[in-house]
Image (spheres, coloured by chain):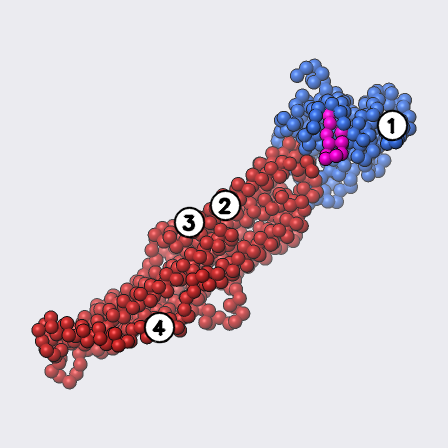
Chain colours: A blue, B red
Amino acid sequence: MNNDDQTNVISVIQLSKHFAEYQAVNNISFTVKKGEILALLGPNGAGKTTTINCLLGFLKPDSGRVNIAGINPAKNIVAARKQLAYIPEQVALYPKLSGLENLTYMSKIAGVNKNIAQFRQLLHQVKLPDHAIEKPVGSYSKGMRQKVGIAIALAKNAKALILDEPTSGLDPSASHEFSELIQTLAKKGVAILMATHDLYRAQEDAHTVAIMNQGELVHSLCGDEIKEAELESLYLQHVRAVSTC
Amino acid sequence: MLVLTLKKEWLESKREGRTLWLSRIVLMLLACALLSSWHSFQQVQSQKQQVETSERERWLAQGKKGPHSAAHYGVYIIKPDTGLSVLEPGLTDYQGVVLRLEAHKKNDTLFRGIQDSIQMQRFGNLTPAFILQTLLPLLIILLGFHSIAAERESGTLKQLLANGLCPKKFFTAKVLALFGLALLFFIPVALYIVYSLLFSDSITVQRSVLFIVSYGLYIFIWAILTLIVSSYARAARSALITLLVIWSLTCLLLPKFAINNAAKQHPIQSSQIFQSKLESEIYTPARQQAIAKFKQDTLTEYGVDNIDELPFAWSGAQLQFGEQYADTIFDRLFGQRQLQLEAQSLHYQSAAILSPFIAVQTLSMSAAATDLAHHQLFSNAGEKHRRLIQATLNGDLKDNGLTIRSSDKSYQGDRHLWEIIPQFFYQYPDIGQLTSHYRRAAICLIIWFITLILLSYFAIKRIRNEGQQ
């Protein structure tokens, strides 16, 4: 493992993946360092979820490779998955179990060794209302479910957090709360990859923004460039430009 | 992971009202069936004991009479039950419980429960065996069909995998959790067996072990089958439909088809035709000729011209000869019938390769001694006793029939003679000696178990590949 690998928690190197005739991802590369938030923007079918599925080890790349904390999921899926936490657009939880029971089960099954008090503390940390902790998840709002998802990631103490459309369908207040939680995690050194359509949230939270379209990484912005850029017009410009090619 | 999964599955099942109600209903049915069978067993045992005692008294107190009259007076013997017949009545209702032993005849057993049943009862009695063999698999399906398929549908499976879930441990934990839940329904039965072992001598350890292991395997087979289907199904609904089709085929249709097919492949004559064939084969001119020859041979052997000159009562010798003549025909015809019935039974058992229900039903009846093999063993023991009675009575007549030749009275036996006839006592043999009768079913059940264990490899692979589509 070289120095780059040590700081780059998430690495995507010349990744390509196709399904039959369809080229889902075409030779893309990016890295997410410790404590960095990378927002992966792009329309539906741009290749964001395929990239995430390669990182999660659900798909094997046709060429190129991906690494999670220096581990290639295609080679050692168990070790790679131990280093990451994943929150999908709809956090999948057991509706008959409470938030606390879901967190306990999901974490313990992933090998996390914590007691109930610690799990309860984690739910407080993600600001899940006290009254909801013992209630069945079936009665939760999407924002509350996302908080349980974040608590699962926190419990795991993962080095990388992968989010697929995390703020989709959240009201502005819930989205803001979620953003705060993400930033807290980044400050703790977690590398965060966030696939999103939410340009506002990307501009607010991300340290790097990468725009994907038709399987290719068409543009990327870092640091101040993000704040200064007219992200919406830049996004539309790149998406439309490739679409009309 | 096992305890964790067990706890989670238990919590979900507990909060899923429908599952809880289903479980309560099945448990209630099982408790009712167990109590009702136990009550009826106790009643029957007490009646049998009374009848056995009074029957012996009846025999001993029959008064003075000719030995051959006593042979026709007959003895009634009662088929014993094991304590496991409370759980598995098997074929008891169809086979009868009392056998009349008399001269010249090999009778069929009497007092078949089915004859006393009202018509509707014939469509299926609520016995613990019926609940364990038919309803419990259905409950296992209803408890577990969604176990993995619903996780796939809701996305929790993908999320668990992404969080580092080990598919093999996950599947194993799910199987063991479902198996554990299903075993809860076996607890009342297990308690009854333990109680019987401790406080009564109606069952043996070997028979109990065979019974418990067979049902343990059967329940495990349904648990793992349910989860294999659930892990393959894209949706919980399709898992449920697939499992219900498998259940109705293996528990309802295949056994019926297998019985019909066995009867077709190894046909047997109806009892009426068989009885008339027996009569026609015994009472023939050949029999008269054989008796005449025996008479001539006996006269020659003793160097006399007339039976009155023989040193013993000819009537006793002739009656015994007639018995032995009929016995060879009984042995041949009943032997053929017995072989056909065994062939039917083995043919039926072979279908266990397609239906674990048939396998467990066979093993369960064997353990409880309520199958055909045990009935035939009892009938054979009864016949042996009948022949002993006839030989003793005819021998007595032969030896003592001349003692009062001078008077007008014929020879009569008394209590002393009746006491020589031992009381019939039968105990089923060790179940280990009867393996040939249930080996095929046991092998089929083990094949099911091994096959499903092997198939679970593909189910685990299917779980591992989740998210690749």
Q: Earlier in the sequence, mark 3 or mark 2?
A: 3
Badge 2: chain ID: B
Few, some or many residues within 10 Å of mark 2 (<14, 14–19, 20+): many
Pick whichever of labels 2 and 4 is earlier in the sequence: 4
Chain designation of label 4: B
Of tags 1 and 4, the one toward the viewer is 4
Three-letter code, disc 3: Val
Same-subunit check for callouts 1 and 4: no
Q: Quadrant of the N terminus of chain B?
A: top right
Q: Residue at x 76, y 25 (%)?
A: A27
* 10 Å crowding of disc 3: few (<14), some (14-19), many (20+): few
Q: Nearer the viewer, residue B418 or A129?
A: B418
Give the amino acid at mark 1.
His
Main SS type for the magenta part?
Answer: strand
Taking the image as drawn, is residue B112 in sight? yes
Q: Which mark is residue B209?
A: 3
**Residue B30 highlighted magenta (yes or no):** no
Crowd class of label 4 (few under 14; some 14 to 19; many from 20; radius 10 Å): few
Question: Range of the magenta residues?
Answer: A15-25
From the image, tell me which residue sits under label 2: B449
Relative image position of residue B94 (x, y in whole percent): 44, 66
The answer to whether the residue labelled 1 contacts the one labelled 3, judged by CB atoms less than 8 Å apart, is no
Which residue is at a point 14% across and 72% down the rendered structure image?
B298
- In this rendering, does residue B23 appear at all? no
Do the numbered discs 1 and 4 sit on residues whose CB atoms are within 8 Å?
no
Q: Is residue B429 left or right of residue B37?
A: left
Q: Picture quarter containing residue A15?
A: top right
The residue beneath circle 4 is: B277
